[in-house]
Amino acid sequence: MEKDERDIIDRLNARDKRAFEYIFVQFYQSLCYFADKYVNDKEAAQDIVQEIFIWFYEKRNTFDSLLAVKSYLYGCVYNKAINYLKMNRNQALIREKMKEFLSEEDESYEEYQVEA
């Protein structure tokens, strides 16, 4: 490990703000691109990555290399993107069920009106 990398890791583990900023600048764009490949929505991808960085800043673990930080961030973004997709799929299913329910209700209401 290079001296600069060791310095960044030591500072990051000591909760140094500049070290966090360095990590953010190093990985933000590539993490957004990575998230977008899953969610296919640039704004949602940026939201996912920003949430991960907020969480990362607040709950920082101890790391021994930049590779470990990178792996950790990519894993978190992957999991968040998959959860986003699951949530959207569930919301789409709920919307579809509501449409079906409402259209059935509308038909039965119309039938009731004709019979009365």
Image (cartoon, rainbow, N blue to C red):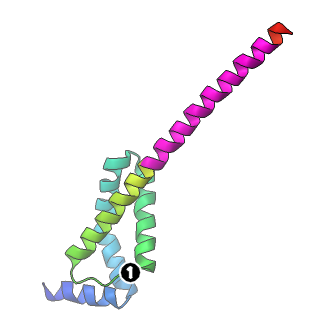
Residue at 33% across, 83% down: 19
Q: Residue furthest right?
A: 116
Near mark 1 (Cα within 10 A), the count class, few <14, some 14-19 or many ≥20, is: some
Left or right relative to 15: residue 111? right
Image: 93 above or below 13: above
Q: Residue 59 occupies which quadrant of the picture? A: bottom left
Name the residue that disc number 1 marks. 60
Instruction: Assess whether residue 35 is covered by the magenta stretch.
Output: no
- Magenta residues, dominant SS class: helix
Image: 102 above or below 40: above
Left or right relative to 47: residue 6? left
Q: Where is the N terminus found, in terms of image quarters?
A: bottom left
Q: Residue 53 occupies which quadrant of the picture? A: bottom left
Left or right relative to 115: residue 46? left
Amino acid on which the number 1 mark rests in the picture: Arg
Q: Where is the C terminus found, in terms of image quarters?
A: top right
The image position of residue 74, as x and y in percent, is 29, 64
Q: Which residues are magenta?
A: 86-112
The image position of residue 2, as x and y in percent, is 13, 85
Q: Which one is nearer the viewer's eye here, 99 or 47?
A: 99
Residue at 31% across, 89% down: 11
Q: Residue furthest left?
A: 1
Instruction: Assess whether residue 96 is covered by the magenta stretch.
Output: yes
Residue at 32% across, 71% down: 25
The image position of residue 89, as x and y in percent, is 46, 42
